Amino acid sequence: MYHFDITGDKVTEVGFRTRIILELQRHHLQGEPTNVKDEEKVRVVVQGNEEQVRKFYDNLKKNPPKTVKNPVFHSIEPGGCAMPANMHEVATILTLEQIDQGIPLLKGMDENLKSINQSLEGVNKSLKGMDDNLKGMDKNLTGIDENLTGIDKKIESLPRRIAEELKAVLGK
């Protein structure tokens, strides 16, 4: 049995243990990753021969998850804190932990969506008011257009009317 630690700016609460479980399975190893939150560290206990453990370690070191910030892989040491649990049990526990962490996030998202819905209802009311205002403006513009048409007709008849008035005044 072997163990090693992974430290860094952000290595816990980012799905790293799930990735470690997948790598353990890919390398046909038994093991268990554990978050050590007080120290921002993941401790990995692995059961297997030294060559298998080294391949697993090297592969994990070359390809850490993108969510992990500046991981530092400490050297592999013989021995371990405890016998690793069955991989299926570990994977199940990690899944349940992730679901448990997601529930408050989903509740928060629900509250945010309710708030967004209320805001959109307000926007919808404002848009309806704007639509009503535009309909009123359209009626006013129609009235103005009708007045302009009447004025056009009066302007067209103006020279004739001026001529008639001049004839009447001058007596011709």
Image (cartoon, rainbow, N blue to C red):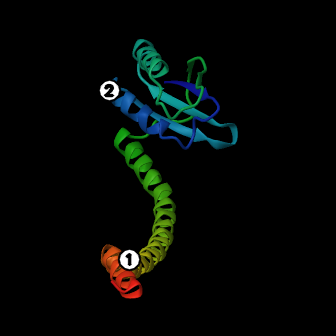
As drawn, the label of residue 21 is none
In the image, 105 versus 133, the foreground residue is 133
Residue type highlighted by circle 2: Arg
Is residue 77 in sight in this rendering? yes
Q: Residue visible at 37% across and 26% down?
A: 29
Whole-angstrom CA distance, mark 1 to mark 2, is 74 Å
Residue 19, by quadrant, is top left
**55 or 86: nearer the eye?**
55
With respect to residue 166, does 70 lie above or below?
above
Residue type pointed to by label 1: Leu
- Circles 1 and 2, Cβ within 8 Å, touching? The answer is no
Look at the numbered disc 2 and give the secondary structure of its residue. Answer: helix
Q: At numbered mark 1, what does the secondary structure look like: helix, strand or loop? A: helix
Q: Earlier in the sequence, mark 1 or mark 2?
A: 2
Judged from this view, the residue extending furthest toward the right is 38
Foreground of the two, 163 or 80: 163
Question: Residue 26: which numbered mark, if any?
Answer: 2
Residue for badge 1: 141
Residue 126 place in picture, x, y as percent: 47, 76
Task: Evaluate whether residue 146 shows in this view.
Answer: no
Badge 1 density bin: few <14, some 14–19, many ≥20, Cα 10 Å: few
Return the residue nearer the eye: 78 or 139: 139
Q: Quadrant of the C terminus?
A: bottom left
